[in-house]
């Protein structure tokens, strides 16, 4: 940090005092506890990964107080609380603690917390998760992402090569018109998209459960 920042942080500026205040820290930690509690409750309805994306890997979230009335309360989500905690911790460190061997322990603790916050943000933005399942006695040259879905159409050609047209689920959720699948001549129209669901055949359904689709299953 340069001298100008240190001078501002150590001055009696109300703005810097607010950013470095312990009261702001308590409020941010309290809101974080509320967010974790509400996110835990929502896992019953949406599962872990959907809640992590909506409540912790976003800037704002909307908690349904009354699902039947479709009334949602806006709340600061993980990215916003993490960014504010990062600013608060940085300002508090240079506002209340001076560099030196005497405060080396405090500086190390604050540096570790900053590393956790920045590392969590980078991980949430850039992480790509997949798994390679290798049955005994077999081999694999690919990995699978179990939470990313797509519709893939494979067209056989005369030269023995495959033409693959893949549509990720992000486009399926926003599709409002008929999509043409490459040069295959096939067209796709999304009637309705069901997130966090799985396709099952009639034989896999519980007894007495109504099956509304009769073709293709």
Image (tube, grey):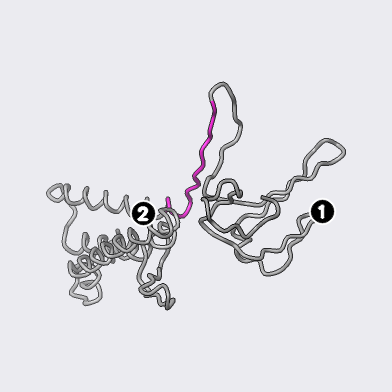
Please report the bounds of the magenta region as a residue range: 122-135
Residue lying farthest to the top in this orientation: 137
Q: Which label number is shown at residue 118?
A: 2
Q: Is residue 101 left or right of residue 196?
A: left
Number of numbered labels in the structure image: 2
Q: Specify few, some or many for label 1: CA neighbours under 10 Å numbering under 14, 14-19, or 20 or more.
A: few
Q: Is residue 193 left or right of residue 119?
A: right
Q: Which residue is mark 1?
A: 183
Specify the principal SS of the magenta part: loop
- Looking at the image, residue 194 lies above or below residue 130: below
Residue lying farthest to the front in this orientation: 208
Q: Position of residue 21 (x, y in %)?
A: 19, 69
Is-magenta flag for residue 25?
A: no
Q: Position of residue 113 (x, y in %)?
A: 27, 52
Q: Is residue 200 left or right of residue 105?
A: right
- Looking at the image, residue 83 lies above or below residue 118: below
Q: Nearer the viewer, residue 4 or 53?
A: 53
Residue 3 sits in which quadrant? bottom left
């Amino acid at each position: 940090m340069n001298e100008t920042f240190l001078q501002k942080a150590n001055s009696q500026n109300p703005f810097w005092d607010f950013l470095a205040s312990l009261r702001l820290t308590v409020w941010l930690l309290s809101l974080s506890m509320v967010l974790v509690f509400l996110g835990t409750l929502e896992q019953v309805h949406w599962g872990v990964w959907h809640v992590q994306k909506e409540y912790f890997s976003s800037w704002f979230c909307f908690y349904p107080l009354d699902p039947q009335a479709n009334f949602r309360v806006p709340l600061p989500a993980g990215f916003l609380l993490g960014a504010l905690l990062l600013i608060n911790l940085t300002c508090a460190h240079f506002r209340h603690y001076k560099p030196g061997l005497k405060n080396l322990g405090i500086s190390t603790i604050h540096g570790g917390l900053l590393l956790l916050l920045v590392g969590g943000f980078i991980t949430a933005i850039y992480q790509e998760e997949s798994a390679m399942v290798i049955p005994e006695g077999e081999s694999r040259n690919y990995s699978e992402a179990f939470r990313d879905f797509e519709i893939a159409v494979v067209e056989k050609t005369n030269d023995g090569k495959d033409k693959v047209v893949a549509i990720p689920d992000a486009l399926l959720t926003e599709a409002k018109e008929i999509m043409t699948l490459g040069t295959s001549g096939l067209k796709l129209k999304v009637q309705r998209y069901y997130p966090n669901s799985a396709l099952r055949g009639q034989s896999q359904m519980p007894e007495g459960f109504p099956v509304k689709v009769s073709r293709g299953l």
